Image: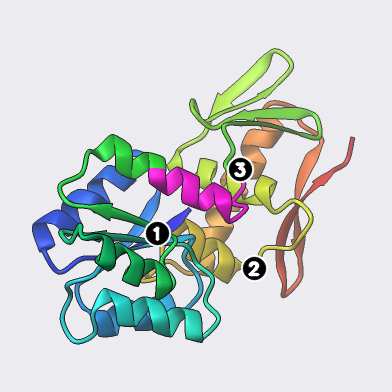
Amino acid sequence: MNILIVEDEKRLANALKQILLEQKYMADVVYDGNDALDYGLSGIYDLIILDIMIPYRDGYEVAYELRKNKIETPILMLTAKDAVSDKVTGLNRGADDYMTKPFAPEELLARVKALTRRRGEVIIDEADFGDFNFNASTSTLTKGSKSVHLNFKEAEILKLLIANRDIILSKEDIITKVWGYDSDAGSNNVEAYISFLRRKLNFVNSSTEIKAIKKVGYRLENKG
């Protein structure tokens, strides 16, 4: 899951990013309204955490412009303003939820989870596909009596493939979701981790295949 943090207080922005990274979310950070709009318009994010008091364009304007451009990404407004009128303004401009500073990390994470689920995001804790089981909390791939641990990138790619089992994922989609919007990762990175995942599927003797669709991308296929 890829989250955009818009917060001009750099210490708070970095703290927010760390909280999310510890929960295995991907997170990009920007510090002003112009960058917030540019990044948000890309449509690649599953959630935007948006401060109101930011330079150039405030959070209200950013939210309004995103909705005007038909960007449906959930927006969580995060601000020191707690007046009812401020909350109403934020919601009317397109925010989905509103949280005031200071906040508890547990509350933030609960709201993040609620907003992404509201959008229909598939949050995988444990899933079966074909003849294998994947436990996201332990990053373990299991078939019968054999199991193997996946590293972080392998686990994120497998979660993405399972969640999108009915469509073909392009390499660009995988890079954006797993490495992040500003990453220098390229096709070779994706190919390498797909190769690692295939080896681990083979290790547990799974008949499931990560099928490469030439010039399009990848999808899971159950050969059993």
Q: Quadrant of the C terminus?
A: top right
Against 13, residue 19 (above or below) is above
Amino acid, disc 2: Ser
Side of 104 where 141 appears, left or right: right
Q: Magenta span has 190?
A: no
Q: Which residue is mark 1?
A: 3
Q: Magenta span has 117?
A: yes
* Rendering coords of residue 42 (x, y %): 47, 79
- Residue at the extreme top: 145
Amino acid, disc 1: Ile
Q: Which residue is mark 2?
A: 170
Q: Which residue is mark 3?
A: 197
Q: Residue at x 11, y 64 (%)?
A: 9
Side of 157 where 93 appears, left or right: left
Amino acid, disc 3: Leu
User: Magenta region, mostly helix, strand or loop?
Assistant: helix
Q: Which-is-in-front pick, marks 1 and 3?
A: 1
Circles 2 and 3, Cβ within 8 Å, touching? The answer is no
Q: Earlier in the sequence, mark 1 or mark 3?
A: 1
Q: Which-is-in-front pick, marks 2 and 1?
A: 1
Q: Which-is-in-front pick, marks 2 and 3?
A: 2
The span picked out in magenta is 111-122
Which residue is more in the foreground, 181 or 215? 181
